[in-house]
């Protein structure tokens, strides 16, 4: 608990300013229940993934401010201030373990945590911000009154050139910083530079603080990875390791193991529904099944659980798969080798587990081999094949370019979201996070259109 107290109380030399924004310098010496270990991390992950989606959708700064505030309140808020701080710190360090393990994971976590810190720092009072700056031991010096008067005209010229920047007055607080410490301000010509120093207004200090935060966290992730690979992973292989290795692909949304809104569907509906409401991943599997009368295990699992989630009953599922597979392998072989796994997915064999349809994250992280058709087309298709597949869904050329731009930047779920919006002529602000969500949202839109035209 000592570490938590140190991380909470920050004072500068002149006041008793206290910030609730931790710097995450060392892991807290707190006992954490295993279920809280996972739940806290998942709540923070909802915040980070919400930020990632907002940034990739190009939301404006003011929209991002509101988004981060709402995400934090919804997922990390608590009536007890101490509990909020504890959850904040614990969840950060759990996710640090989760995302330290590969370069891609580190890069994503570093960007999202930095964005979160930027927004939280911006909401702190100015005295608390100065306290945080003092704790960072930043390479900056307050500009004296005499120096400010000498440079006031130059500082005013820069301020006037920046939209929203207030013209400096005698009460304005400025810091001078080695110019290489604030590259984004220098690149944007938002600071006055004199004799190797950038003169940074108090409301621009966030750039300096965030750069330092990012640098510290980047180094810490490398160290965490070394500890994870050398000792922690093996020591905790039966307890924490399975949780840590699963968290980065965790699905955080509703359960689609049972159809809720649209009830059951019949075999006769499948071709029409595949055309109108299946996401590209499931549409591709469905078409390949119809063409080849066979799918490998990964494809059968991905499509089979999706169909279960949209309302295909076990009896109809057995009839559907048998009708296709028997054309390739014969009815007898189907009954011997394939029917069991279908009943198993519906919880009628083995452990009687009610298996859940795959989320986007699980599908994206899969690694299909030669002859496989499962996985995420936005990630696994060639550009030529993806363009053709999206075009067959009725997406226009301009929208295809937008989709391909997201694919190139590895925003695969957003690419699917843009496809959904182009196909349905309707926005999807929540983003597509699950194939069964795609199906449900599609059906809602189509039914509303049918009712309006009735």
Image (cartoon, helix red, strand yellow):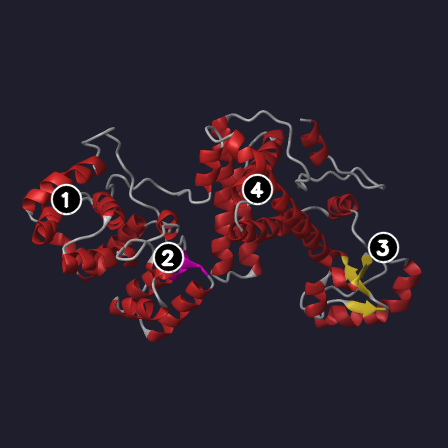
Q: Earlier in the sequence, mark 1 or mark 3?
A: 3
Quadrant position of the C terminus in the picture: bottom left
Q: Are marks 1 and 3 in contact (CB under 8 Å)?
A: no
Task: Give the main secondary structure of the magenta stretch.
Answer: helix
Cα gap from disc 2 to disc 3, whole angstroms = 47 Å
Circle number at residue 428: 2
Cα gap from disc 4 to disc 2, whole angstroms = 31 Å
Circle number at residue 142: 3
Q: Earlier in the sequence, mark 4 or mark 2?
A: 4
Q: Earlier in the sequence, mark 3 or mark 4?
A: 4
Q: Mark 1 or 3, which is nearer the eye? A: 1
**Stretch of the chain drawn in magenta:** 410-415
Q: Is residue 315 above or below residue 272?
A: above
Circle number at residue 317: 1
Q: Earlier in the sequence, mark 4 or mark 1?
A: 4
Between 278 and 82, the one lying in front of the other is 278
Q: Mark 3 or 4, which is nearer the eye? A: 4
């Amino acid at each position: 608990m000592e570490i938590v107290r140190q991380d909470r109380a920050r004072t500068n030399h002149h006041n008793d300013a206290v910030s609730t924004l931790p710097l995450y310098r060392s892991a807290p010496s707190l006992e954490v229940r295993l279920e809280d270990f996972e739940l806290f991390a998942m709540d923070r992950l909802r915040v980070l993934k919400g930020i990632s989606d907002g940034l990739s959708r190009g939301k404006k700064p003011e929209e991002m401010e509101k988004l981060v505030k709402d995400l934090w309140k919804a997922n990390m808020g608590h009536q007890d201030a101490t509990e909020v701080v504890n959850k904040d710190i614990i969840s950060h360090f759990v996710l640090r373990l989760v995302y330290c393990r590969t370069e891609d994971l580190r890069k994503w976590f570093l960007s999202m945590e930095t964005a979160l810190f930027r927004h939280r720092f911006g909401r702190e009072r100015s005295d608390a911000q100065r306290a945080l700056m003092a704790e960072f031991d930043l390479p900056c010096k307050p500009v004296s009154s005499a120096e400010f008067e000498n440079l006031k005209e130059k500082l005013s010229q820069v301020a006037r050139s920046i939209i929203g920047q207030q013209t400096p007055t005698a009460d304005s607080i400025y810091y001078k910083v080695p110019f290489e410490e604030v590259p984004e301000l220098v690149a944007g010509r938002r600071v006055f530079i004199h004799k190797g120093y950038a003169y940074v207004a108090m409301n621009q200090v966030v750039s300096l603080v965030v750069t330092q935060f990012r640098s510290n966290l980047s180094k810490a992730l490398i160290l965490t990875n070394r500890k994870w690979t050398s000792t922690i992973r093996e020591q905790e292989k039966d307890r924490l390791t399975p949780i840590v290795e699963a968290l980065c692909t965790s699905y955080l949304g509703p359960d689609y193991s049972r159809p809720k809104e649209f009830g059951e569907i019949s075999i006769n509906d499948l071709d029409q529904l595949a055309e109108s409401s299946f996401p590209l991943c499931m549409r591709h599997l469905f078409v390949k099944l119809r063409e080849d009368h066979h799918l490998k295990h990964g494809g059968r699992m991905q499509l089979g659980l999706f169909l279960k989630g949209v309302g295909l009953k076990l009896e109809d599922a057995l009839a559907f798969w048998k009708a296709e597979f028997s054309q390739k392998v014969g009815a007898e072989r189907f009954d011997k080798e394939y029917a069991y796994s279908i009943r198993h997915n519906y919880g009628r064999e083995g452990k009687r587990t009610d298996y859940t349809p795959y989320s986007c994250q699980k599908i994206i992280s899969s690694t299909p081999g030669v002859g496989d058709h499962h996985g995420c087309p936005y990630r696994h298709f060639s550009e030529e094949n993806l363009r053709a597949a999206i075009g067959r869904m009725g997406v226009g050329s301009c929208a295809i370019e937008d989709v391909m731009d997201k694919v190139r930047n590895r925003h695969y779920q957003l690419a699917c979201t843009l496809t959904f919006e182009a196909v349905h002529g309707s926005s999807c602000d929540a983003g597509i996070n699950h194939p069964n969500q795609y199906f449900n949202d599609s059906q809602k839109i189509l039914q509303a259109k049918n009712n309006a035209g009735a």
